[in-house]
Amino acid sequence: MGITQGILDASFAAAEKAGATRITEIHVSIGELTEVVDFALQFAFEALTPDTMAEGATLFIEMVPARSACHDCGLEYDHDRFEMLCPTCGSLNVELLRGREMSIDSIEADNDSTEE
Amino acid sequence: MAHIDLGQPILDRNERLAAVNRARFAEAGVFVLDLMASPGAGKTSTILATIAALRDRYRIAVIEGDIASKVDAEKVKAHGIPAVQINTGGACHLESDMIKRAVDTLSLDELDLIIIENVGNLVCPTDFNLGEDAKVMILSVPEGHDKPYKYPGIFQISEAVILNKVDTMPVFDFNEDEFNGEVHTLNPRAPIFRIAATKGEGVAEWAEWLAARIEAKKAERAAGADA
C-alpha cells in the first residue's frame, strides 16, 4: 500500500507539472528480488485511485528478473531469487546487477481541456 | 495525450530521507544497525545482550519501532541506555522519516552505535532503506529451519544472520544443517551467529563482528577527515 501510494504521489506530481488533468497509464518496473507482489500492487492501485486524477488508469508492471555477474569466471547470468551462486564455477564472489529495482518509468497523461 | 518519462524510484521520498539520515550518521561517525525479525524472535533480548557486551567500549542508543506501546523502550531505558520509541500506528515497517524524527531527539555526537529495532515482520522492512550501515536479521529456533526459503528477501538483504534461542534446539525439530545450507544459498557471504540472547551464549562472537564494523566506520571517518 505504501509502495502504491509512492507510485501515485510521483505520478500526480509529474502530471500536474506537465499541466495534465488525467492519468491514463502508469508504467513501473519491479525487481523480482523485492518483496513487491504484482497482484497486491494492482489491488492497492484499484483501492487508491477512485476520485483521483488516475481514476480508471491502467497500471503496467514489468517484473525484472534477477541478474548477477561472477567476478571469478566473468559469467553474467539470470537467476531466480533462491540461487545466488555462480552456476558454472560455484563462486560466492558474485555481484547483483539487477533485480532489486522499484521504479516508475513513465506515465501517459492528458489534459481534458485541450482535447475539446 | 502526453507521454511523460519519470525514471525515478517509487520510494523516492524514503530514499531521499534515507540519504539525509546516512549523511548525518557519517558526519557524526555513528554506526547504525537496522535489526529485523519476526515478533517474538528476541530482538529486544538480543539488543540487551549486545548492549551488555559492548557498553564498556561504545556509547549506544536504541530506536524502538513498534506498532504501539512503549514497552521495549522502557526495557532498554531501565538499563541506563537512551531509547526512543517510535509507534508506527499500524504501519508494518519503519521508514526513514520516522528515523529522522527519532534521531532529532538524540545527541549524535555523543554516540558510537545506534541500534534500530524494526517492527516485527519478515517482509516489509526489507525494501525500506533507513540510512543504516547494515541490516541484520534474527531468526529464532522455534520459528523453524524452513524460513529462509519462505522469506528469502530478508535473508538476502541482511549482512549477517543471528540464529537466536539455540538453547531450545533439543525441544524443536530444527534442522540446523538445512538452515545453514539455505542461508548460504540465498546469501553466500552472510555469517550466521548462534546465540541464546537471554543466557548470553554466543553473544561475544556477534558483538565482535559488530565492533569490527563500528571500528571500520570510525576509521573511514578519520580517513575522510584527513583527506
Image: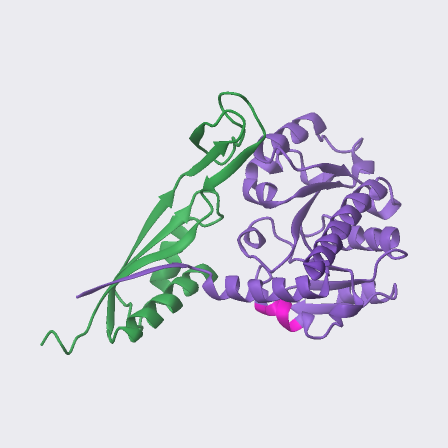
Quadrant for residue A58, please give it. Answer: bottom left
Q: Residue at x 77, y 66 (%)?
A: B73
What shade has chain A been given?
green
Q: Name the residue furthest bottom.
A: A113
Q: Name the residue furthest top.
A: A88
Is residue B90 in sight in this rendering? Answer: no
Above or below A85: residue B117: below
- Colour treatment of the image: by chain
Question: Which x, y percent locates residue A48?
Answer: 37, 66
Q: Residue at x 37, y 50 (%)?
A: A29
For the C terminus of chain A, the quadrant is bottom left
Q: Provide the major secondary structure of the magenta segment.
A: helix
B73 left or right, relative to A94: right
Q: Residue at x 75, y 55 (%)?
A: B218
For the N terminus of chain A, the quadrant is bottom left
Quadrant for residue A55, please give it. Answer: bottom left
B101 left or right, relative to A106: right
In reply to whether residue B99 is colored magenta, the answer given is: yes
How many marks on residues?
0
What shade has chain B been given?
purple
Q: Name the residue furthest left.
A: A116
Is residue B100 in sight in this rendering? Answer: yes
Question: Which x, y percent locates residue B64?
Answer: 71, 63
Specify start and end residues of the magenta stretch as a single range.
B97-101
- Using the image as rendered, state which of residue B162 and residue B91 is in the foreground: B162
Q: Residue at x 68, y 74 (%)?
A: B104
Question: Which x, y percent locates residue A10?
Answer: 38, 67
Question: Which x, y percent locates residue B119?
Answer: 64, 58
In reply to whether residue B122 is colored magenta, the answer given is: no
Q: Name the residue furthest front.
A: B227
